[in-house]
Image (cartoon, rainbow, N blue to C red):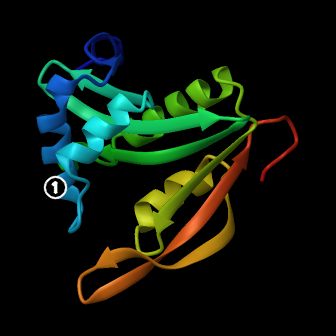
Amino acid sequence: MSAALEEASVSFDDMRVSDVAEVSAIEAETYPFPWTAGIFRDCLRAAYRCRVLRDPHGIVVYGIVSAEAREAHILNLCVRSALRRCGYGRRMLAHLLELALAAGARRVWLEVRRSNAAAVALYDAAGFVEVGVRRDYYRAPGGREDALVLALGLDPGESH
């Protein structure tokens, strides 16, 4: 498929309540302790920026960001497993950062599992820096896992 055709066949959209089942299925195929459909519905009710990137077959990637008081928090970003390593996560991250900036955010925060090497590499490539660790933050098979706390400054010349 040509790049132009591929670009024409995907689009960013607001996540809708009708998307929650598909988003939840992607989440469940990705994580051993996924968000529930209720959590996604709560994010929609809270008016967080819940976005999806669709292709003709359905949702490819979704992301959720909240932004208030000049700060934003990326709450979730997940790519359908069959389409990972194709640049969709990078595209969604850039889109979420644009939304945060448009909402007046000057700093973006997120937590990521220490063991999620692909996500850590994605955020590192985007300029996020580690600013802390939340001990035992995530449920994990056999116990708990630390979260790395990452930040990105959106003001020119600021990294965290």
User: Looking at the rendering, which quadrant does residue 77 occupy?
Assistant: top left
- Secondary structure, mark 1, is helix
Question: In the displayed structure, would residue 41 be above or below residue 34?
Answer: above
Residue receiving disc 1: 28
Q: Which residue corresponds to the image point at 11% horizontal and 37% vertical from the top-left?
A: 21
Image coordinates for residue 76, horizontal then vertical, percent: 40, 47
Q: Residues within 10 Å of mark 1 (few under 14, many from 20)?
A: some
**Side (left or right) of 144 relative to 100:** left
**Side (left or right) of 71 relative to 40:** right
Residue flagged by tag 1: what amino acid is it? Ala
Could one spot residue 125 in this view of the protein? yes
Front-most of 130 and 139?
Answer: 139
Image coordinates for residue 96, horizontal then vertical, percent: 52, 32
Image coordinates for residue 102, horizontal then vertical, percent: 65, 20
Q: Which residue corresponds to the image point at 24% horizontal and 34% vertical from the top-left?
A: 60
Front-most of 17 and 85?
Answer: 17
In this view, the residue farthest toward the right is 157
**Side (left or right) of 38 relative to 113:** left
Question: In the displayed structure, would residue 24 be above or below residue 104?
Answer: below
**Side (left or right) of 95 relative to 1:** right
Q: Which residue corresponds to the image point at 67% horizontal and 54% vertical from the top-left?
A: 151
Image coordinates for residue 134, horizontal then vertical, percent: 56, 75
Could one spot residue 87 in this view of the protein? no
Front-most of 127 and 143?
Answer: 143
Question: In the displayed structure, would residue 48 be above or below residue 130?
Answer: above
Quadrant of the frame with the N terminus:
top left
User: Looking at the rendering, which quadrant does residue 153 occupy?
Assistant: top right
What count of labels does the image hold?
A: 1
User: Looking at the rendering, which quadrant does residue 8 occupy?
Assistant: top left
